[in-house]
Amino acid sequence: MISIPIKIIEQIAEHAKRDYPIEACGYLTGKDDVVSDIIKMTNTDKSNEHFSFDPKEQFQAVKYARSRGERLIAVYHSHPDTPARMSREDIRLANDTEIKYIIFSVKDNVIKCFEIDKDKNVAEIPIRGI
Ligand SMILES: [Zn+2]
């Protein structure tokens, strides 16, 4: 379970729609499984099929979370024209078993959250809007 303020879910949707047809991406920060903030990031790939973070922005995001006594709970990205599920590429690139992966489908207007284990098994995690 991950708890996300409704306002932040709306911001993810807005970000995804604004950057369409390019994938939007960013981090959610907070404590335990409760999200309190969103950090919108630049998709340096400028692609509609994958994304990469700017290492400088990534460093800033970690610093920002730490300064608030929080951590990066989840990384989110959008799927402009495909469903909200982990693509083969998403699974290949997901190496952090501590972070959650959130995908917002612009096409379906659906948000989903996933976790991955060290053997690359993907599990969907329920999202609770708070
Ligand atoms: Zn993806």
Image (tube, rainbow, N blue to C red):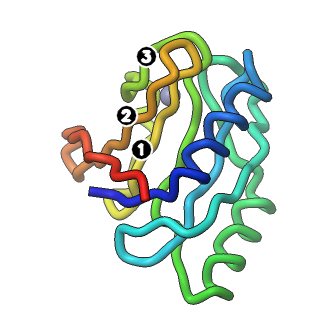
Amino acid carrying label 1: it is: Ala
Residue under the image location 62 percent in, 66 percent down: 37
Say which mark, if any, is on residue 112: none
Indicate which disc residue 94 carries.
Answer: 1
Residue hosting label 3: 83
* CA neighbours of label 2 inside 10 A, class few (<14), some (14 to 19), many (20+): some
Crowd class of label 3 (few under 14; some 14 to 19; many from 20; radius 10 Å)? some
Dot 3 amino acid type: Pro
Q: Earlier in the sequence, mark 2 or mark 3?
A: 3
Q: Amino acid at mark 2?
A: Ile
For the residues labelled 1 and 3, the Cα–Cα distance comes to 18 Å
Quarter of the image for the N terminus: give it.
bottom left
Q: Position of residue 36 (x, y in %)?
A: 55, 69
- Residues tagged 1 and 2 counted as in contact (Cβ below 8 A): yes
Q: Earlier in the sequence, mark 1 or mark 3?
A: 3
Q: Residue at x 61, y 17 (%)?
A: 80
Q: Nearer the viewer, mark 2 or mark 3?
A: 3
